[in-house]
Amino acid sequence: MRKIDIFDTTLRDGEQSAGINLNTAEKLEIARQLERLGVTVMEAGFPAASPGDQEAVRKIAGTVKNSIVTGLARCNQKDIDAAWEALRVAEQPHIHIFLATSPIHMAYKLKKTPDEVIEASVEAIKYAKKFFPLVQWSAEDGSRTEPDFLARIVTEVVKAGATTVNIPDTVGYATPQDYGSIFKFLKETVPNIDRVKLSAHCHDDLGMATANTLAAIENGADQVEGTINAIGERAGNVGLEEVAVALHIRKDHYNVETGINLKEIKRTSQLVSQLTGVAIQPNKAVTGKNAFAHESGIHQDGMLKNPNTYEIITPELIGDAHTELVLGKHSGRHAFKARAEEMGFTLEPERLNEAFAEFKKLADRKKVITEADLLVILTDQQIQEADAPIYELAGVQLSSGTANIPTSTITVVRPDGETVTEAATGTGSVESIFNALERIVSEKVHILDYRVSSVGKGRDALGEAVVKVLIGEDEITGRDAAQDVLEATANAYLNAINRKLVKNAQQAPAETVPVT
């Protein structure tokens, strides 16, 4: 079978979604899971954007061994040098260079002629080849580029030493027939096209990203790019989980393989959702909670007689088996550690002890501990960064009722170590919590979005709170999970404030990150 490489850009294009701001520890945790998933290439970030992004890319490049790690760069030496500083420690140093090629981008954004765009691309690739054995070049807005010019510039970048050429549908404008024809045209027109991999990168503005990606594969694409849970700029990128499962289920038609470990899809999806704060829509293909739900009587009858009547994908295929943990309040540290390692976590002894303590606290309150519960506990410990002072919730006391004005009294330990208690009222318990916390923190905070959801099932399930706030010009998402959703709400608010503090401490002002 023909091999299709999977290029994951969750940590770069996915993080450009409005309101997503992953710290280095969270990026590293997602990178480890993407490695377990089996992606061929992962785009860890844009090293020239900020010192923080460069450091995150460097740590991922030094940690991940079984996937190729790459970073984005514009066609200039400064960006390429920044990428090399971050990626020189990688097993296979790889850089992703791009420049716009459509008439509208060249005229209005770049203010360059076609010849200047070709010259800049060729010079950048030749410079990058001094350091990187693997150089990918992307024609930003490639789907709206004139075919003859696209063939001309692709010919030149291949001559310059590019090893992969990406043709993005940057604004999600193409139809499957149009997009597929671009790859067919390049295969038939560019004389040296067999020296490179052709890559597809689709956005979902018109809801055709998955169809366009599959059309590219049918017409000669060797690599496809996308994100987990289809996150990304505007309407998002193609969801890699959808592409991988479609190619598996319909291998009779596509006759290709990806090397993706399908059983890691569910966990990868959950982890990305948890750390980004972006919920998975219930009817999302493959990973939505309704993907394997059957309510219609006719459907239920068919499922009871033969599951294949209405279910072409099984939960087990993507690792969604809903098994319960054989762990409880009497479980010991060794059993807990073994289970953590089985789930892919490698915690330092101190972090493992803290995770075990949290597990025992939860086990005293819950009858059944699920894998979803343990995933939350272990992930929270693994992504903790202890290099910056933060706000810590010390206590929450609420008074409310149909005849009373909701009042919250909150005690918080400030970053300077001072313990402060404030009280406030609100139209509801949640607003009173936010009002009290706003008196404590030193930032002016505007609440943009707030939601709660259950982690697992049952009346004693953990409640996860996600709060999106605006602090200055930054949209920050905070999250927390606890059995008490109001406690989780307060902690989610403080988590957002703490993320802003860490960002201020670790990062210089970042440049605007471009989109491919």
Image (tube, rainbow, N blue to C red):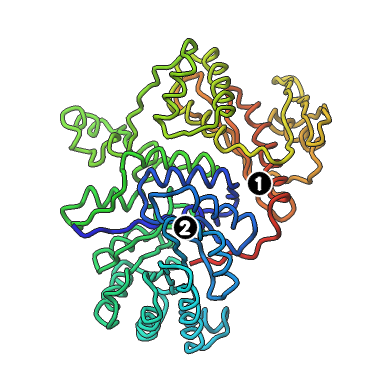
Q: Quadrant of the N terminus?
A: bottom left
Q: Where is residue 147? Give x, y as percent.
A: 35, 82
- Counting other residues with Cα less than 10 Å from the Cα at mark 1, is it few (<14), some (14-19), or many (20 or more)? few
Q: Secondary structure at mark 2?
A: strand
Q: How many marks?
A: 2
What residue is at 65 percent from the left and 26 percent from the top? Answer: 487
> What residue is rendered at 52% in x and 34% in y?
379
The front one of 204 and 335 is 335
Residue 229 marker: none
Q: Which residue does the numbered mark 2 point to in the structure image?
A: 43
Name the secondary structure under disc 1. Answer: strand
Q: Is residue 199 above or below residue 256?
A: below
The three-letter amino acid code for the residue at tag 2 is Glu
Q: For the view shown, which residue lies furthest in the top direction?
A: 330
Is residue 494 depicted above or below 56 in this figure? above
Front residue of this view, candidates 13 and 104: 13
Q: Position of residue 391 (x, y in %)?
A: 74, 35
Residue type (three-letter) at the residue carrying disc 1? Leu
Quadrant in the rendering for residue 313: top left
Please tell me which of labels 2 and 1 falls first in the chain: 2
Image location of residue 57, percent across then percent down: 54, 55
The answer to whether residue 236 is visible is no
Residue at 28% x, 78% y is: 185
Q: Are marks 2 and 1 in contact (CB under 8 Å)?
A: no
| In the rendered image, the vertical position of residue 385 relative to residue 18, given as above or below | above
Whether residue 382 sits left or right of residue 415 in the image: it is left
Which residue is denoted by mark 1 in the rendering? 448
As measured in the structure, the alpha-carbon distance from the residue carrying label 2 to the one carrying label 1 is 29 Å
Work out whether residue 175 can be spotted. yes
Residue closer to the observer: 174 or 24: 24
Residue 15, position in %: x, y?
54, 53
